[in-house]
Amino acid sequence: MFFPAPHDVKDTISKFAGFIGMVASIALAVHLILPASAALSSTAHTLVSIIIGLMIGWLSFAVQLKK
């Protein structure tokens, strides 16, 4: 699924780069969408955004379409 064959180095690099890029873009979008509040510090707000980005990114790579 997520991990390609060991002899495919280019495929491995492109999948990891795509995953990291997807997580970064989702985390940025969530960070901009969530309102700043007094209850959450800046660090906690960023950490929550990164965690949400990781979870959504992992789900998008884990889902496989059946043909």
Image (tube, rainbow, N blue to C red):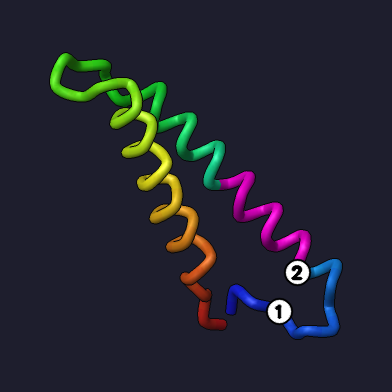
Q: Earlier in the sequence, mark 2 or mark 1?
A: 1
Q: Residue furthest left?
A: 39
> How many neighbours does mark 1 have within 10 angstroms: few (below 14), some (14-19), or many (20 or more)?
few
Q: What residue does disc 1 label?
A: 4
Above/below status of 3 relative to 28: below
Can you tell which mark lies on residue 12?
2
Magenta segment, prevailing SS (helix, strand or loop): helix
- Do the residues bearing badges 2 and 1 touch, measured as CB atoms within 8 Å? yes
Tell me the quadrant of the picture where the C terminus can be found. bottom right
| Picture residue at 53% right of the left edge, 65% below the top | 61
Circle 2: residue type: Thr
Residue span colored magenta? 12-22
In the foreground, 22 or 66: 22
Q: Is residue 32 above or below residue 14?
A: above
Q: Is residue 27 magenta?
A: no
Name the residue type under label 1: Pro
